[in-house]
Image: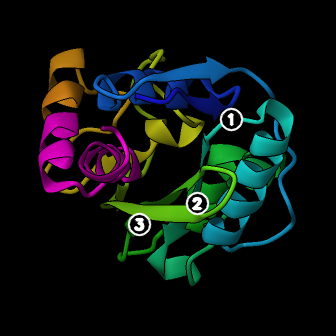
Amino acid sequence: MEEIIFVTHNKGKIASAKKALENVNFKIFEYDLEEPRSDDIKYISEVKVKEAYNLVKKPCISIDSGFFIEELNGFPRAFVNYTLDTIGIEGILKLMEDKKNRNCYFGECLSYYDGKEIYQFMGKHEGTLSEQILGNDTADKWSDLWYVFVPKGYEKTLAQMTDEEREERRQRKREECSDSLSAFAKWYLENEGC
């Protein structure tokens, strides 16, 4: 099986990949890829995976994600890091004060590039926005939004969940192939990983 390189510096993405891609021959190359100014996560992921491939000259994957709040017309979308660096979680919660519709989701796109073709795999994690910051730090977190994101079917933020609860949720997402890492792993093992 050919080795795939995952170019990222995000510790939470690395932890998730190690669990979801346990049957795929991949290694991590820690590097901070350029992120184009766009609110299209598919486009951002594609640009980043091409940059990664040019860097390591081997098949690569890249994941980009966005956070979408219904009541705010999808804001902040792919501008999550900029939003967290400027107004922070507190600012997002302030924008949502007294709002009844707290539906939101993480959208993600994993791009795989073998030097010839790009394949993209989408994931969606639905939930609601809590009214306050809740929970503890965890090595699995992709973003500080974990302190305010309550996954659909749960009553706790990701940061409040125990390791066992997060693993049970992860396993369910894996079985449904509703996250980009699991969808990619399934496709790769069926098509490329021979």
Judging from the image, what secondary structure is the residue with disc 1 in? loop
- Circle 3/circle 1 CB separation < 8 Å: no
Label 1: few (<14), some or many (≥20) within 10 Å? Answer: some
Q: Is residue 187 magenta?
A: yes
At horizontal 52% and vertical 32% (from top left) the residue drawn is 13
Q: Which residues are magenta?
A: 169-194
Q: Residue at x 44, y 44 (%)?
A: 148
Gap in angstroms between the C-alphas marked 2 and 1: 26 Å
54 or 82, which lies in front? 54
Q: Which secondary structure lies at badge 3? A: strand
Q: Residue at x 86, y 66 (%)?
A: 37
Give the crowd class for mark 3: few <14, some 14-19, many >=20 residues within 10 Å: many
For mark 2, give the secondary structure: strand
Of circles 3 and 2, which is in front?
A: 2
Query: Quick one: label 3 or label 2, which is nearer the N terminus?
Result: 2
In the image, residue 59 sits, relative to residue 14, either above or below, namely below
Q: Position of residue 12 (x, y in %)?
A: 52, 26
Which numbered dot is residue 66?
2
Between residues 61 and 88, which one lies in front from this camera angle? 61
Residue linked to disc 3:
104
The magenta stretch spans residue 83? no
* Residue type at the position of mark 1: Lys
- Mark 3 is on which residue type? Cys
Indicate left or right for 57 with 182 as reference.
right
- Which residue position holds label 1? 58
Q: Position of residue 132 (x, y in %)?
A: 45, 43
Task: Give the mark nearer the N terminus: 2 vs 1.
Answer: 1
The disc labelled 2 sits on which kind of residue?
A: Gly
